Amino acid sequence: EVVMTQSPATLSVSSGERATLSCRASQSVSSNVAWYQQKPGQAPRLLIYGASTRATGVPARFSGSGSGTEFTLTISSLQSEDFAVYYCQQYDNWPPLTFGGGTKVEIK
Amino acid sequence: QVQLVESGGGVVQPGRSLRLSCAASGFTFNNYGMHWVRQAPGKGLEWVALIWYDGSIEYYADSVKGRFTISRDNSKNTLYLQMNTLRAEDTALYYCARGYLGVVGYTFDIWGQGTMVTVSS
């Protein structure tokens, strides 16, 4: 099973600042990584797939990068609606499809 | 609009069974692989099971293999999860999700709002 490890667990950022979230895979997953955003009381939302392709309707301030075992989600200028928990997910080696433990982006 | 609506959750004693349903609308259901994903209270996401667009192939997480069965009725645009021999650690919010990318849909682009399952004596 591919283990996805996200860091940090919590990221404190001010509105307008840049946020950088990391995700590491226990073995190479090529570029087969997706990112999701989950706000309190809501279902997750697909943001990024293929490590760097934004899903439909996702603002350009969200960008993904990486390949192999190291991946990054960057939010270029945090807006109030971006404070949430973010999960990475691999789909290279399955089953199972596996998620990281999440990074909570909170207001500094 | 594209929508998934789960139902069937509740409080159940350990060892008992429960069946969840997920009604799909706004898209051609039989074109998509479908998944169940769960989230224990205050915890992260865990993939549970997936089923091919035509119901021909299923996969399960090891934690539920042999106890849970995913199925679908394409004539009713409905996805199911039959959960048997429930354990306390199965307590979670269960989401159905539409598969996106590839033959089965390896990511999840549409999610329901979830149905809560609590396993407790």
Image (cartoon, coloured by chain):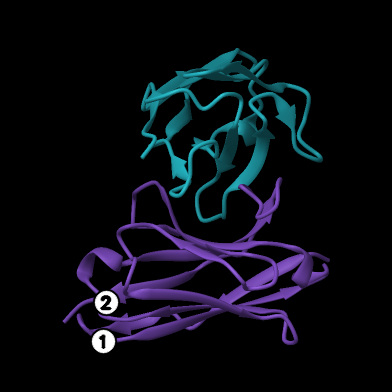
> Which of the 4 quarters of the picture holds residue A55?
top right
Letter of the chain that mark 2 sits on in the rendering: B
Q: Residue at x 67, y 33 (%)?
A: A48
Query: Which chain does tag 1 point to?
Result: B
Of callouts 1 and 2, the N-terminal one: 1
The quadrant in which the C terminus of chain B is found is bottom left
Q: Which mark is residue A97?
A: none
| Colour used to depict chain B in the structure image | purple
Vertical relation: B61 (above or below) A7: below
Q: Are marks 1 and 2 on the same chain?
A: yes
Q: Identify the residue at horizontal 32%, vertical 86% (top origin).
A: B17
For the N terminus of chain B, the image quarter is bottom right
Instruction: Name the image quarter holding residue B55.
Output: bottom right
Q: Is residue B110 visible in this depiction of the protein?
A: no
Label 1 crowd (10 A; few <14 / some 14-19 / many >=20): few
Q: Residue at x 57, y 17 (%)?
A: A67
Residue B43 seen by the camera: yes
Residue A100: x percent and y percent? 42, 35
Q: Is B32 left, or right, of B82 in this rendering? A: right
Circle 1: residue type = Arg
Element carrying mark 1: loop
Give the residue at mark 2: B86
Residues at discs 1 and 2 in contact (Cβ within 8 Å): yes
Q: Colour of chain A?
A: cyan
Residue located farthest toward the front when viewing the structure as drawn:
B56
Q: Which residue is mark 1?
A: B16
In the rendering, at what x and y percent does residue A42 appear?
56, 54
Under tag 2, what secondary structure? loop
Residue closer to the observer: B91 or B87 = B87
Left or right of B112 in this view: B41: left
Q: Is residue A9 left or right of residue B89?
A: right
Q: Residue at x 67, y 17 (%)?
A: A77
